Image (cartoon, helix red, strand yellow):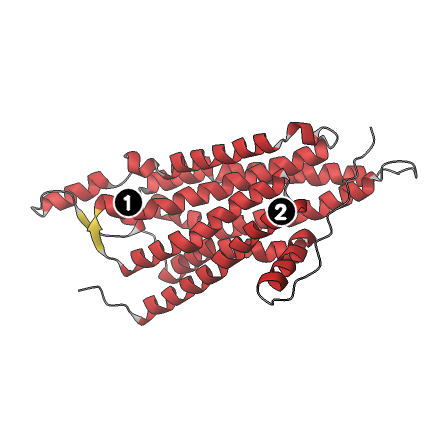
Amino acid sequence: MPPSISAFQAAYIGIEVLIALVSVPGNVLVIWAVKVNQALRDATFSFIVSLAVADVAVGALVIPLAILINVGPQTYFHTCLMVACPVLILTQSSILALLAIAVDRYLRVKIPLRYKTVVTPRRAAVAIAGCWILSFLVGLTPLFGWNNLSEVERAWAANGSVGEPVVKCEFEKVISMEYMVYFNFFVWVLPPLLLMVLIYLEVFYLIRKQLSKKVSASSGDPQKYYGKELRIAKSLALILFLFALSWLPLHILNCITLFCPSCHKPSILIYIAIFLTHGNSAMNPIVYAFRIQKFRVTFLKIWNDHFRCQPAPPINEDPPEVRPDD
């Protein structure tokens, strides 16, 4: 018989389903907007699409698997391990996409005149492919052997059982906390986050420095260019802040699990941390809609054209970007 579901589990499942129902359509809308609006076809928005793909997968794949794990079915060890790994892949993909976005914004303000020759569509595509390949390697590392199989097998053999162990499928039952803390957090999460903070600090410094310069009437209006860069950088830095705010609590709880096994972790804190990580996938489209005008206008056009049956006027393409003079 399937395991019975408590009222608390039912509430958990309801919240997870709500997050998925916001995350999937919202991020599909982001991808759709980039497809239909030519003004959203530069490298930055290509990386944003990669981030949106990961967020769609969180809502469509990770959340259903998380609900399955919460119910706690009895499965073979490696089956449970395969259920647990997708979230690791998608988290890493999101981090690397955010890092690529940060580097892209830095290049836009550091070398504005040479930016389009350095950051070509082909190089952006290679960077996105590289991010996903690396994400799969990092996220699938537990399947390559860094997991809790040896501990589970000892307990399985001690009970006189043979064959592949059958476990109650829980994340911490199959994923090694040494992997989660020493490898995943200390190598692939925390350093990229710190690097992104430094990059955005430098971006804001360079922009402020350029905006503080007096501009002659005959110049190429670099203040307009850097003013636009400042607005976009602030929005993308907010995306980074929300990601860190959403994911750091769960990683801190993992550190407590590893370094203080006897410490009690209230279940409510664990659930809040899980909700934050999954809810982060629903936050980005909301930020884009409120903070980036190109997205807001395109979202409204898609809504009017396809859902209200009232075609909106064509989106006005941006005029050629103003580049600061030498």
252, 294: nearer the viewer: 294
Left or right: where does residue 174 sit relative to residue 220? left
Q: Earlier in the sequence, mark 1 or mark 2?
A: 1
The image quadrant that residue 43 belongs to is top right
Left or right: 248 as drawn, with respect to 219: left
Which image quadrant for residue 70? bottom left
Task: Where is residue 57? Give x, y as percent.
Answer: 43, 50
The residue drawn where x is 36% and y is 60% is 267
* Residue on which disc 1 sits: 81
Q: Please report contact status of discs 1 and 2: CB closer than 8 Å, yes or no.
A: no
Tell me the residue at 37%/45% (across/down): 86
The image shows residue 108 at horizontal and vertical percentages of 69, 35
Q: Secondary structure at mark 1?
A: helix
Secondary structure state at the residue bearing disc 2: helix
Figure check: 295 above or below 120? below
Which of the labelled discs sits on residue 236, or is there none? 2
**Foreground residue among 87 and 185:** 87
x and y percentages locating residue 243 in the rendered image = 53, 49
Left or right: where 25 falls relative to 225:
left
Q: Could you classify mark 1 by the number of other residues whose Cα lies within 10 Å: few (under 14), some (14-19), or many (20 or more)?
A: many
- The relative height of residue 129 versus residue 11 in the rendered view (above or below) is above
- At label 2, the amino acid type is Leu
- In front of the other: 43 or 246: 43
Q: Quadrant of the N terminus?
A: bottom left
Distance of label 1 from label 2 (alpha carbons): 33 Å
